[in-house]
Image (spheres, rainbow, N blue to C red):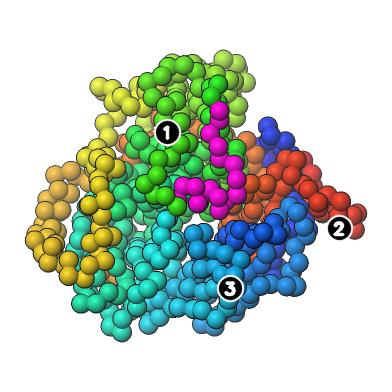
Amino acid sequence: MAAEGGGKEMNEIKTQFTTREGVYKLLTHSEYSRPNRVPFNSQGSNPVKVSFVNVNDQSGNGDRICFNVGRELYFYIYKGVRKAADLSKPIDKRIYKGTQPTCHDFNPLTATAESVSLLVGFSAGQVQLIDPIKKETSKLFNEERLIDKSRVTCVRWVPGSESLFLVAHSSGSMYLYNVENTCGTTAPHYQLLKQGENYAVHTCKSKSARNPLLRWTVGEGALNEFAFSPDGKFLACASQDGFLRVFGFDAAELHGTMKSYFGGLLCVCWSPDGRYIVAGGEDDLVTVWSFMDCRVIARGHGHKSWVSVVAFDHCTTSVEDGDPPAEFSGSDEDFHEHYGAGRDRANSSHSRLSKRNSTDSRPVSVTYRFGSVGQDTQLCLWDLTEDILFPHLPLSRTRTHTNVMNATSPPATGQNTTTVSTTTNSSGTNGKDNVSNSSTSGNPANSLPSTLPRSNSLPHSSNPAGGNTPNSHTGSSTNSSSSTKGNSIIDGAFIATSVSKFATLSLHDSRKERHEKDHKRNHSMGHISSKSSDKLNQLSSSRTAKADAAKTLGTTLCPRMEEVPLLEPLVCKKIAHERLTVLIFLEDCLVTACQEGFVCTWARPGKVGLLSSQNNPANSPSGTVV
């Protein structure tokens, strides 16, 4: 936990922290930044982001790092815990005029020591494909901003593909591109392909192949981040309207939905086995959502401001019950390659976890480690343990740093009881954000209910009578995972002549049907306008925002604070002067970055390596050690 002494101690930057595995240490020699190492004046600039790729170099220096700072983009050999960073020799450096890079992503499938494919999104809406090693190859998409004029918020290669990539914008739209296609000289014309609860997918009408292949319109307001599931078949979207929406990617079917406790969702990530999704945002919380059950299973409270990044640590996530543990070791690229290269390949780790989570009642020991960083300059690490995942099973080890507010198993000691009430109090009175929400609940902010809904203490697969029923759109769309490749909307979008195939889907009729469904369900979500810039839509959404929060609070979309377990962080440390924008877990370290433009490497326990001999008193870190 963060130091509670107040004053000077609270403001000192930590250079190491301890978990059950040992001590994580900041490697000051492995700090990457602009060559002059001068803190960047971050006022009004886009967040610093970091991307990694492994080029399978025979020399052992296969990792490459890319990061943006203001108008600049840098590409270096990343030496991690092995050697000190040499900032005087970037492989590539680019300075952009009139626009700023906002995000980027390497394609791990095509990366070699001679060539890498790097996508870069920009604040004015364009997307550039560059090769920072060869330097001469470059393509620009949405160059004339005819497809979308708003800022690019997230760009990702489609897992398992060498040519398809997905781009999200602050308009709330996502576009699927093919690097082989051009974007055309006129604005694209769209035809409705698929429509559902507050989302629509359009295909681009064109006689010849052109970009974009598809346009997704998701929710209201900006689409802040999306993430593909480890097998590449599902897509999780975090939106400014506060909703997490999970889609079957090929069939464009809505699998499930979750609503933030307050404000927009800013970040999202999947567990290595694809069973859980963690989202963070403007409610200062991290929320754990079960993919199988389409419901919130826990929240974590530790940050004092917006949560900007969440990420699972695939090296520390483990399953133990006598069988060999699930293998989540290896580099970040190996991990992506293992899960992404064969999208239809059976996932051994996934099936191993599935066996443990089936009707088998023997004690299991499952621990998922994930981390979060926020605008409060703090790094938090969290353990998601079996007492949260399987509250109906006997515990196989003692609980640590986890508050399970469960009516059937009250805390054993007075100390634990105090912790639970204190934590609930702090989250219930966490500034102005939560005051309005706690007043809508039946309980005072600092008290616990006498009992919890029965569904929290039963197996996830069952839906007890009298428990919370899943709302209609999550329950009805859970079969999307069984959809076959034949239903793939990507396949349909490739064929320019396939427009007639969907001619029966009249836009007018679909809108009418959807409006009737919304009316029947009494949903608070308004229907989507086909134009992302529709000002009436924006006005109505802001007008109904407060009503939306009141309607969803206390439902399966957004349980009340006292209805789900509240996690405490294992570690909560201030590690930077400016807001944190990056958290990436690698095999022998974790990487963070702040808005000043400093990319920091934290060696895992026992992985300090060669750098320990290079640390001399003159270069010792100035922060405190705790």
Question: Is 117 in the magenta?
Answer: no
What's the residue at 37%, 39% (across, down)? 291
Sooner in the amino-acid sequence: mark 2 or mark 1: 1
* Percent position of residue 73, x then y: 60, 72
Residue 348 vertical position relative to residue 239 in the rendered view, above or below:
above
Q: Residues within 10 Å of mark 2 (few under 14, many from 20)?
A: few
Q: Which residues are magenta?
A: 324-340
The kind of residue on which mark 3 rests is Pro
Q: Which mark is residue 518?
A: none
Question: Does residue 72 show up?
Answer: no
Q: Residues within 10 Å of mark 3 (few under 14, many from 20)?
A: many
Determine the image quadrant of residue 23.
top right
Gap between marks 2 and 1 measured at Cα: 48 Å
Residue 399 vertical position relative to residue 235 in the rendered view, above or below:
above
Q: Which residue is mark 3?
A: 132
Instruction: Give left or right: position of 579 versus 224.
Output: right
What's the residue at 40%, 80% (across, down)? 143
Residues under numbered marks 2 and 1 in contact, where contact means CB atoms less than 8 Å apart: no
The kind of residue on which mark 1 rests is Ser
| Tag nearer the camera, 2 or 1 | 1
Q: Which residue is mark 2?
A: 619
Q: Which residue is mark 1?
A: 351
